[in-house]
Amino acid sequence: MLFGRNKKNPIKIADKKIVEWKYATCGYCSTGCSIEVGFNDEGKAVSSRGVADADVNRGKLCLKGIFEHELFTSAGRSLTPLQRDNWHQSWEKTSWDSALDKVYDGIKTVQEKYGRDSFAVISTGQMLTEEFYTLGKLTRGLIGTNNYDGNTTLCMASAVSGYKRSFGSDGPPGCYEDFEHTDCLIAWGSNLPEQHPIIYWRFKEAQEKRHFPLIVVDPRVTMLAQNADIHLPITPGTDVVLQNALMHVIFKENLHDSDYIKANTNGLDELMAEVEKYDPITAAKICGIDEDTIRSVARLYAGAGAAMSIWTMGINQSTHGSDGVVGINNLALITGNIGKPGGTSLSITGQCNAMGTREWSSCSGLPNHRLLENEQDRKDIAKFWNIDEEFLPKKRGMFQTDIYHAIEAGHIKGLWLIATNPLSSLPNSERVRRAMQKLEFCVVQDCYEDSESNQYAHVYLPAGTWAEKEGVMTNTERRINLINAIIPPPGEAKPDLWIFNQMAKRFNKDNKVNFPDKSADIFLEMGSISKGRLADISGMSHALLEKNRGIQWPYTEQQAAAGEAPPAGGKRLYTETATFRYADGKAKLIPLPFIDNNEVPDEKFPIWLNTGRLIEHWHGRTKTGKIGNNNKYSPIPFIEINPDLALELGIKRGEYVRLVSRRSDAVVMATPTHRVPKNMVFLPFHFHDCANRLTLGLLDPHSRQPAYKQSAVRIERLEDQQAAAQLSMEMRNF
Ligand SMILES: Nc1nc2c(c(=O)[nH]1)N[C@H]1C(S)=C(S)[C@@H](COP(=O)(O)OP(=O)(O)OC[C@H]3O[C@@H](n4cnc5c(=O)[nH]c(N)nc54)[C@H](O)[C@@H]3O)O[C@H]1N2
Ligand SMILES: Nc1nc2c(c(=O)[nH]1)N[C@H]1C(S)=C(S)[C@@H](COP(=O)(O)OP(=O)(O)OC[C@H]3O[C@@H](n4cnc5c(=O)[nH]c(N)nc54)[C@H](O)[C@@H]3O)O[C@H]1N2
Ligand code: SF4
Ligand SMILES: [Mo]
């Protein structure tokens, strides 16, 4: 034995000969980890590491952050602008000037022929905030289309809508530190260990110290559910029923906080009248959670000194997405759990800068949560940008999901896609494909040329990504952090900001509107129009952000001048009585009647299709599909299928099966696991031409976000496994 041990080679860590570490913030998820990239003496990025003194991640990174530097040299990065007259033709390389001129002409032609709003712009949650702000100025102030939205409609729209309905404004009121104070945590439709691994680690550390209960509401036994004290495997799409039943018990047993409700809310009577209908016995039949469990969760939550909820796509991506968010807020408000340490309702955001786009992109309104519907807001911004106030629309235009329906109907004829890939991410992809084929003019601006949507573009603009650009991003807890441009984009690719500024020159011929070149200057401009607002960032600068490893908003110029150390009050919102953003400072308690309007399993399509994510991949895999250490974990599209169902259907582990929905079909590998119940399969949506061929994606009436998590399918065994493997491979090798 000893002999064997002695013979083992000691582990050697290769010396990567790093001569310099450069600071950035991770560009994948919204956790906002501070990261340093190591460069060797040849100037090559060879390593990434977490920043030890950053409060968010305290030296840690997850599987994606650790290999993020490999993006710079990954396959599929584009090197030159491309153009063609229609999408049937092959691409021609072109210069930046001619590509940008073609975009300008294309936009003008469509607008002149069909009207200003017939050209749509769809942006993202994955650029830098200064880029969002500049694109907003260009789109709202110069191009002048009202059909300007972002992929955040697929992601955070329900959270935004729910916050606005409850509190009078968007803006998550809590922070990660709340885990260190809470006495009870409910996680709704959030798979934290896989999708926000470092937030999960912050939670876990706090929980191990103080042992507060974790309650997980998710139809799957996710890794988070496996760690839960109570797992509520809810019937898909019925969270609102559970929320109403929890409130029913809280009121019945007098567990609510009357003083808080009186001082801070309106609408108690209407809410009580609605939840009266949801006694646990009735509710249990709809939401699938038994009455005793409903009662004990209500008691645990309302009885805790401080209780918090977090949620992600299991709530947002539903026909009751916005209502589900309001339900979580209702629960927090009736128990006095807002604005206090450990008592909050915290939406875990998705993309790295989903928050920055909400604050600054002008997609749904005007900068810094200003509204197109508000005359004063329109006046202020028109004056500041030096544009005619009448040029701004008086209400917001279409959401991304409605823009696609309008393309289909022939109302929208031109489209500019920026850092989003709808052919892979919108529901019912064949419908999306047909819509894109109808476009008279389409521009794709992406850091990867092989983004599927680029198949239908007339001009392709190669962009830089992540730390090839300088600017800021806002994370889930409202923390703004800096990314330095630590390496130039490859070939002739350019930072998105540069591209917007070049476009602006073409629309801004008389130079009326100011478009600064430097990201740090744009940030100061944004600071100046944030003064006195909820998201006041006037005390921040790029240099201060790097020094502090991010600062939570608000941080005002007065606080900075007084030398108050950040976060200086930015940790939580609504900490004082009646400081919500409605005119009287009170939040709204909103009744939530439940209407069962989803596609549900039936005889022909008897299985729930649940779609979502894996830790190793990012969305459509334009990035992680090219990084060996990410891709190797799941290079093949697969489903999680319950072993009993697999047995019943005669399907073995590793066999290919065909999933069929009312829309289309997809061939995937079967992975039997007890993580899903017998009437459900889970299909990660990372693989092209797969999950979203099947999804229906009914829209939430308030947020227009698709219900990606609730569709119905049947499963077919495939006799010819060889042919099935080939088919599945062809799909993923697109
Ligand atoms: N590794 C990785 N991390 C990511 C991303 C990524 O692509 N890869 N994407 C980022 C983005 S943009 C986002 S939006 C987030 C998403 O983060 P999450 O929302 O945590 O991830 P999902 O896997 O989409 O869905 C979460 C859970 O919702 C559950 N669910 C389904 N239906 C219901 C329901 O009716 N009720 C409830 N309560 N739960 C339900 C699913 O079973 C699933 O476990 O992740 C971010 N982080
Ligand atoms: N079935 C199903 N579908 C879903 C979901 C689900 O859970 N289930 N989730 C939805 C959610 S929450 C989201 S957020 C969406 C995401 O949907 P998408 O936005 O389509 O997802 P990505 O693949 O991240 O697309 C981003 C694109 O931007 C490019 N890109 C990255 N960084 C930059 C940059 O700095 N500049 C430029 N110009 N380009 C860049 C990438 O190469 C990629 O092509 O998917 C939605 N679709
Ligand atoms: S948790 Fe999110 S922000 Fe942190 S390293 Fe992982 S992907 Fe990046
Ligand atoms: Mo998202």
Image (cartoon, helix red, strand yellow):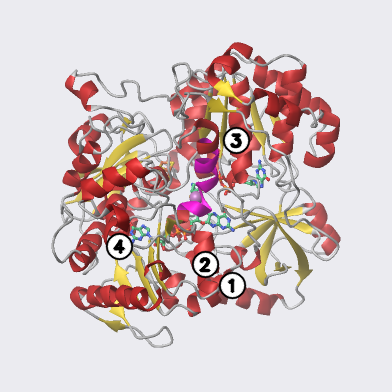
Q: Earlier in the sequence, mark 4 or mark 1?
A: 4
Q: Is residue 282 above or below residue 661?
A: above
Q: Residues within 10 Å of mark 3 (few under 14, many from 20)?
A: many
Instruction: Residue type at mark 2: give it.
Output: Tyr
Which residue has dot 4 on it?
73
Which residue has dot 2 on it?
404
Q: Residue at x 44, y 46 (%)?
A: 63
Q: Secondary structure at mark 3?
A: helix
Residue 267, position as x, y percentages in the image: 63, 26
Magenta residues span 152-163
Instruction: Residue type at mark 1: give it.
Output: Arg
Q: Nearer the viewer, residue 258 or 173?
A: 258
Q: Is residue 162 magenta?
A: yes
Image quadrant assignment for residue 721? bottom right
Disc 2 versus disc 4: nearer the observer: 2
Q: Earlier in the sequence, mark 3 or mark 1?
A: 3
Res. 101 in view: yes
Which residue has dot 1 on it?
431
Which residue has dot 3 on it?
326
